[in-house]
Image (cartoon, grey):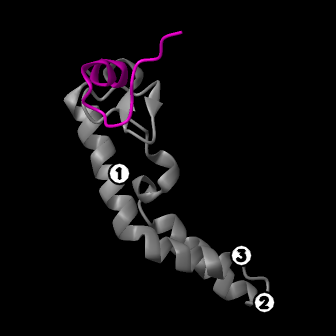
Amino acid sequence: MAKTSTVERNKKRRRMTKSAAGKRAKLKAIIMDRDTNDEDRFAAVVKLAQVPRNSSKVRIRNRCELTGRPRATYRKFKMARNKLREYASKGMIPGMVKSSW
């Protein structure tokens, strides 16, 4: 089980990313547009630097929803490999069965 503080920090980052996504997209569009003048682009860079870093999508860590495990997490199920296998063996994930040959 991961520390509760790290799991909560990651949840906070997800919330911040969702709330600041529009503002970040507008500022990045201004920065990437070559037709805007240099003063406006520089002002957009400064405003983007003032936006909290944790609102960036890059800072989110994929973690298991059940245990908080940071590695070996399947994006589709949002579960770590060991919990995914456990739930699949119990038949709790529809359509997934343990392979045997």
Q: Position of residue 69 (x, y in %)?
A: 35, 25
- Which residue corresponds to mark 2? 35
> At 63% across and 79% down in the image, what residue appears?
29
The answer to whether marks 2 and 1 mark residues whose Cβ atoms lie closer than 8 Å is no
Residue type at numbered disc 2: Asp
Give the mark nearer the N terminus: 1 vs 3: 1
Question: Which quadrant: the C terminus?
Answer: top right
> At 33% across and 43% down in the image, what residue appears?
10
Q: Note whether 63 is above or below 27 in the view shown.
A: above
Please indicate whether residue 100 sits to the left or right of residue 87 in the image.
right
Question: Which quadrant: the N terminus?
Answer: top left
The answer to whether marks 2 and 3 mark residues whose Cβ atoms lie closer than 8 Å is no
Question: Would residue 96 be counted in the magenta stretch?
Answer: yes
SS at mark 1?
helix
Q: Position of residue 30 (x, y in %)?
A: 64, 82
- Which residue corresponds to mark 3? 32
Please indicate whether residue 90 sits to the left or right of residue 100 in the image.
left
The answer to whether marks 1 and 3 mark residues whose Cβ atoms lie closer than 8 Å is no
Q: Residue furthest top?
A: 101
Residues packed near mark 2 inside 10 Å, few (<14), some (14 to 19) or many (20 plus): few
Q: CA distance from mark 1 to mark 3?
A: 25 Å
SS at mark 2?
loop
Magenta-tinted stretch: 84-101
- Report the number of discs: 3
- Which residue corresponds to mark 1? 13
Q: CA distance from mark 2 to mark 3?
A: 9 Å
Q: Note whether 1 is above or below 13 in the view shown.
A: above
